[in-house]
Image (spheres, helix red, strand yellow):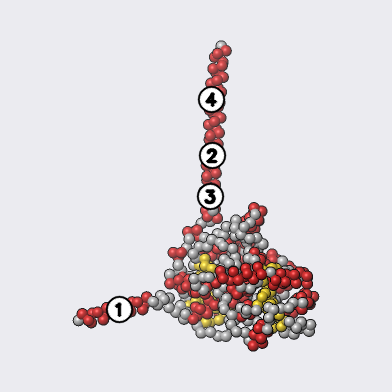
Amino acid sequence: MKLQVFRVSTLFLLFGLFASSIDLVTSENVLFILPIASKSHKRAYEPLINALAARNHQVTVVSPVKLGKDRENVREIVTNTSIFDRFSDPLKLRAQGTLSMMFQSYDFVFEACQRAYREEEFLSLYKEKFDLVFLNAFMNDPFYGFIYKTGAPYILLTPQAAPTSLTEFVGNVMPSSFVPSAMLPFRDEMSFKERAINFLFNLLLDLYVGATMNHKIEAVYRKELGEDLPSLDVFRRNASMIFTNSHFTQTFPRPLLPDVVEIGGMHCKPAKALPKDLQEFADGAKDGLILFSLGSIVQGNQMPDSTRKVFMNVFSRLKQRVLWKWETEVMSDLPSNVKLSKWVPQQDILGHPNLRLFMTHGGLLSTQEAIYHGSPLLAIPIFGDQNLNAHQAELGGFALTIEILDVTEEDLETKIRELLENKKYAENAKKLSKVFRDQPETPVERAVFWSEYVMRHNGAHHMRSAARKLNMFQYHSIDVFAVLIISLLVILWVVKLATVKIIKVICCRRAKSVEKKNQ
């Protein structure tokens, strides 16, 4: 009898240990809303999509870009496939300037969102049950109403370091005294003038967006889903978390609440063997290899012939080999040390031991890959956040920048040789790579953990800071300062009145005393 009881107890103990080793989150339904996302934005989130699917979650992805081959547990709804046609000439956008492109983007957002809301396959999703929703918070604000209809907790994704205009809604205000705006060329240590500009820029941008854009965004989702939907601010404040595609090695250190999680570099991975032709070209680069790629948006045929010749002439004078991502793989005056390729496995090239320099447009993913693999950069920013990425890479001591619209052979060659011959750039890149890789878990593992954490705890409301409920005046204690200043002024006023009164009384008594003596 005792033996039987012992066996049963042991069985229950083993079962308990086994059960405790299993995640409480089983197979759940997860929705990614990325209807306005470029290829690079989609690629930034793809590792998380695949990781959740691999853990047996059923993942639905709404995006204008297909992931590629079909994957188990992943359903794709491709929408707005032509939304980026208006940005088909990036060099023209470069000439127009950042602010011009920003204003164009707002019109583009409303048009793209209205088109997505007209697609039945997309609209039918809110009738399904989802346990967690991800929203690309960059230019997708009209879809907050859609998330509200699902009733699921949601996590906001940012394709770059989360700006204070977003994090402030979850109570995580970035101090303008040492966190520069992504649109300003400042570092974290700013002069008084720079701090003033940074503060005023953030303030005016918030006022502009609040006064001109929010009601337009609300009008879009209320028209499609009902006039009774809450305001945009309410939706932003109710996000369970923010996943920011950043890491402090690339941006500046900044204060983050526990519900703002850095997942930068999810796509970074060790280099693999190259295709045969590229492997032979890279292995034969005894004096070093240079990779030149302007990303997926800038096509080779969009580069003016005069600009192309500048690069070709400089490359012909280098002893290093150059692998150039060029869409046609045809060029009549191609130097012997240059190889063209329509597609390059970028990370496998960056991880090759002969790689000496990466010439890039400065996209965030490319910059993160360069940091991961420890490669110096020659940044050639075109638009968007690329100016900021290039500037921060320069501040990190592993990059230089050139302007593609007026590049000269002298400037290009001088900077290439500086990056190749001055060892400090390679040393700084390797040092940064070591710091970037030194993490307790991979960014993907971190993102998966917190995603499942939100599902396990039904939105993780216990992590929400009380700062979410405070307005700007309360958060910065402006109301307290106002009361203190007013109180001080009242006290000073009372003291002044009392002093005047006392002086008058004293003077009056003295006058009477003098008058009596004179009598």
Residue at 52% x, 44% y: name it. Answer: 484
Q: Closer to the camera: disc 1 or disc 2?
A: 1
N-terminal-most mark, 3 or 1: 1
Return the x and y of residue 467 as percentages of the image width and height.
Answer: 50, 58
Q: CA distance from mark 3 to mark 2?
A: 16 Å
Residue shown at 47%/80% (left/top)? 55
User: Identity of the amino acid at label 1?
Assistant: Phe
Q: Secondary structure at mark 3?
A: helix
Amino acid type, callout 3:
Asp
The image shows residue 304, relative to residue 281, as above or below, that is above
- Marks counted in the figure total 4
Residue 479's disc is 3
N-terminal-most mark, 2 or 4: 2
Quadrant housing the N terminus: bottom left
Q: Which residue is mark 4?
A: 505
Amino acid type at mark 4? Val
- From mark 2 to mark 4, how far is it between C-alphas? 22 Å
Q: Which mark is residue 490?
A: 2
Q: Are marks 3 and 2 in contact (CB under 8 Å)?
A: no
Give x and y (percent) for residue 485. 55, 44
Circle 2: element type:
helix
Mark toward the start of the polypeptide (1 vs 4): 1
Q: Residue at x 52, y 66 (%)?
A: 260
* SS label for mark 1: helix
Q: Does label 1 or label 2 sit earlier along the sequence?
A: 1
Give the number of the disc on residue 12: 1
Q: Quadrant of residue 320?
A: bottom right
Question: What amino acid type should be assigned to the residue bearing mark 2?
Answer: Val
